[in-house]
């Protein structure tokens, strides 16, 4: 990936030089597109919209006070819950198609505890029974409330040697599985995801992030004095910033803390998918790792790679992440291929100032902007639906149907590389190995081409085994025949010479 990125950067540089030449002034204006993807070389290209922004809603539109620095959203069925951190409340919004109405505002609850109000909450999870789990950050606790907002239990800082005694317990994100086990993130905790039993008992961490460090800093530290070492930043695991649990109880984690150089070799993993043992099982079979933008230059104060702050996964195992740096949304399939990217920084519909959360209801996406306090709804377009239909048909084994959808995708966007690969994969499943090889060759998909070639070679040998055996037999007899011919010629020559000698006498 690193080599291709360098080549792509060089090509972009050449294009930039051409663009500023006098002969090219008329074409020097860069076209900014809303939806895009990356080709094999990592160069951005325009794409038809897979999602379109259709509405913008904030507190004033809903008839309540404006959201103030909201930090999260959650969806249960057709209810959208907004964590309005600055106003110390959680707002439940009923979603009926395009209509959003406020169902309730949660600022307090009842129960046997001293503080019955929320303080700077940062996340909420609502289970299938309607119970609330709230990361009540300002009050240093996690709350478990029933649907009547009565306190079931309050979780404060666990008494554990695994936690730094000097740091307060400030939970920031929380998800809950069907067994009632809670998984939480907290400020200044970088040992992974905190895990609690259903009764609130803390049992440890899962999914600890790997330690990352800079080699030059490591060498410098080896030769430093103790005083100098004390002033250096320790090499510690990076912190996660968000959690999401899917319908199979896999936990998706995101982080925006990593060294930029670590993106090239894959050691930086902004997105992870944890199993029950805490192992990362996210598939990364795409041409590029799922990291957001592949090319990222300085523009209007925005610099560096994408910084992912939230994730949501749909039932077909496609997932969407939001980048707080450039306000963009990236959609990936279960194999880690980038399906499309859209959005950007700005104040227009479909653009963001500081996106902080993303959720989905059906196929619609909802994105929360922490600065403006607004929620933008995105609906899938025909082009986007064709892509997902192709993926769905392939998943259920209807390879003919998948290929037909991919062909329709190519009619709308002839540059959509994943469609070529999708058709090739469908043909491969249908045992049309030669046809699959042609599509893989177009996209320079070496791995899939090699797989198709292996099956094609095996299939050809099996279908032509009789001819192969005949040819091998013939080839085996050729040396014997040649030797026999040589012997006959030698004998004939010898006989001829004897006859000549006899005549001369």
Image (tube, rainbow, N blue to C red):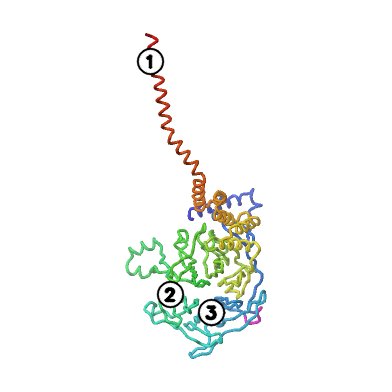
**SS type, badge 3:** loop
Residue shown at 52% from the left, 67% from the top:
308
Residue occupied by mark 1: 498
Tell me if residue 369 can be seen. yes
Give coordinates of residue 339: x percent, y percent: 57, 61
Tell me if residue 303 can be seen. no
Q: Nearer the viewer, mark 3 or mark 2?
A: 3
Name the residue nearer the viewer: 199 or 252: 199
In the image, is residue 36 above or below residue 504? below
Per the rendered image, the range of residues in magenta is 60-65
Residue occupied by mark 3: 127
Marks 3 and 2, how far apart in space? Answer: 25 Å
In the image, is residue 42 above or below residue 244? above
Give coordinates of residue 361: x percent, y percent: 60, 72
**SS type, badge 2:** loop
Marks 2 and 1, how far apart in space? Answer: 104 Å
Q: Is residue 420 left or right of residue 483?
A: right
Marks 1 and 3, how far apart in space? Answer: 108 Å
**SS type, badge 1:** helix
Give coordinates of residue 446: x percent, y percent: 50, 51
Q: Is residue 341 left or right of residue 175?
A: right
Count of marks, rendered view: 3
Please rate how many residues cluster around mark 1, counting C-alpha atoms within 10 Å: few if below 14, some from 14 to 19, many from 20.
Answer: few
Q: Residue 386 lies in magenta, yes or no?
A: no
Give coordinates of residue 494: x percent, y percent: 38, 19
Q: Residue 63 lies in magenta, yes or no?
A: yes
Residue occupied by mark 2: 189
């Amino acid at each position: 990936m690193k080599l291709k990125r360098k080549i792509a950067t060089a090509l972009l540089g050449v294009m930039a030089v051409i663009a500023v030449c006098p002969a090219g002034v008329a074409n020097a204006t860069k076209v900014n597109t809303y939806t895009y993807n990356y080709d094999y070389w990592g160069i951005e290209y325009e794409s038809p919209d897979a999602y379109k922004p259709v509405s913008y809603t904030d507190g004033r539109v809903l008839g309540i006070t404006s959201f103030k620095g909201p930090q999260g959203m959650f969806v249960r069925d057709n209810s959208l819950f907004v964590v309005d951190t600055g106003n110390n409340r959680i707002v439940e919004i009923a979603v009926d198609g395009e209509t959003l109405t406020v169902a309730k505002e949660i600022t307090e609850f009842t129960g046997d505890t001293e503080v019955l109000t929320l303080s700077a909450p940062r996340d909420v999870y609502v289970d299938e029974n309607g119970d609330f789990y709230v990361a009540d950050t300002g009050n240093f606790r996690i709350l478990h409330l029933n649907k009547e907002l009565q306190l079931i239990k309050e979780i404060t800082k666990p008494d554990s040697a695994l936690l730094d005694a000097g740091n307060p317990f400030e939970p920031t994100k929380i998800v809950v599985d069907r067994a009632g086990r809670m998984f939480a993130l907290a400020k200044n905790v970088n040992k992974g995801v905190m895990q609690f039993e259903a009764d609130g008992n803390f049992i440890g961490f899962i999914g600890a992030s790997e330690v990352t460090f800079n080699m030059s800093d490591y060498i410098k530290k080896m030769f430093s004095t103790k005083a100098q070492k004390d002033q250096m930043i320790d090499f510690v695991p990076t912190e996660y910033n968000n959690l999401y649990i899917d319908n199979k109880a896999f936990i998706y984690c995101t982080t925006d803390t990593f060294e930029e150089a670590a993106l090239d070799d894959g050691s930086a993993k902004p997105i992870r998918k944890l199993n029950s043992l805490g192992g990362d099982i996210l598939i990364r079979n795409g041409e590029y790792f799922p990291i957001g933008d592949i090319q990222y230059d300085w523009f209007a104060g925005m610099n560096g790679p994408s910084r992912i702050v939230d994730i949501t996964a749909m039932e077909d195992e496609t997932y969407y992440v939001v980048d707080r740096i450039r306000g963009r949304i990236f959609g990936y399939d279960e194999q880690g291929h980038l399906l499309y990217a859209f959005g950007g920084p700005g104040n227009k519909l479909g653009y963001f100032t500081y996106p902080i959360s993303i959720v989905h209801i059906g196929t619609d996406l909802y994105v929360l902007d922490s600065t403006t306090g607004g929620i933008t709804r995105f609906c899938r377009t025909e082009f986007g639906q064709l892509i997902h239909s192709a993926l769905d048909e392939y998943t259920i084994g209807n390879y003919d149907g998948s290929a037909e959808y991919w062909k329709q995708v190519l009619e709308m966007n002839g540059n959509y590389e994943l469609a070529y690969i999708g058709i090739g994969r469908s043909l491969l499943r249908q045992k049309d190995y030669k046809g699959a090889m042609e599509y893989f060759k177009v996209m320079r998909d070496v791995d899939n081409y090699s797989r198709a070639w292996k099956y094609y070679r095996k299939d050809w040998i099996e279908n032509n085994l009789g001819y192969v055996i005949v040819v091998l037999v013939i080839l085996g007899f050729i040396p014997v025949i040649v030797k026999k011919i040589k012997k006959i010629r030698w004998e004939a020559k010898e006989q001829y010479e004897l006859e000549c000698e006899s005549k001369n006498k």
